[in-house]
Image: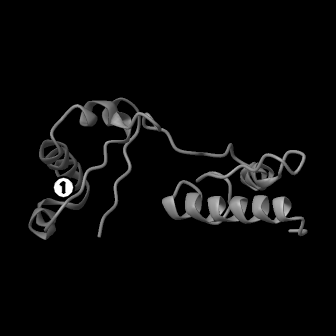
Amino acid sequence: MAIVYVGGRLARELGELRDADAAAIMLDRLQSVFGNAIAGKLTASTVTGWSRDRWTRGGYSAARPGHAHRRRDLMAALGERVYFAGEAALTAAFATVHNAWLSGYDAARRAAAQLSGYAH
């Protein structure tokens, strides 16, 4: 399995193409690195067009070097009334859907505990 993340201008250009055409361009790039033998190994491809997604517009979280530990700060409640969640909020698996789900679950649990009067 190969997973390729593309950013910047190339990501925008690929986002304008049909998925099959974008996959073909990336296969050409992989061949330039690993040689032509890789072409026969590709059995399927999936292209996600984050640049076309109205909610992300191609972005995902990235901490500045030396500041990944600050992601914990995103999980702190504001006055025990506002709880944040999202793919950037936990340190173990940032920039992933499962991290967004886990942090959302945790924020909902803490908010419910606050509303019911139980300490969290």
Residue density around tag 1, few if under 14, some if 14–19, many if 20 or more, within 10 Å: some
The percent position of residue 9, horizontal first and vertical second, equals 35, 29
In which quadrant of the rendered image does the C terminus lie?
A: bottom right
Instruction: Name which residue lies at 37% across and 41% down.
Output: 50
In this view of the protein, which residue sits in the foreground, 77 or 3?
Answer: 77
Three-letter amino acid code at disc 1?
Gln
| 96 lies left or right of 50 | right
In this view of the protein, which residue sits in the foreground, 119 or 31?
Answer: 119
Residue matched to label 1: 31
Give the image quarter of residue 110: bottom right
Instruction: Name which residue lies at 37% across and 44% down.
Output: 6
Instruction: Name which residue lies at 83% across and 51% down.
Output: 77
In this view of the protein, which residue sits in the foreground, 120 or 95?
Answer: 120
The percent position of residue 52, horizontal first and vertical second, equals 33, 35
The percent position of residue 27, horizontal first and vertical second, equals 18, 53
In which quadrant of the rendered image does the N terminus lie?
A: bottom left
The percent position of residue 59, horizontal first and vertical second, equals 49, 39
Q: Which residue lies most toward the left here? A: 40
In this view of the protein, which residue sits in the foreground, 66 or 120?
Answer: 120
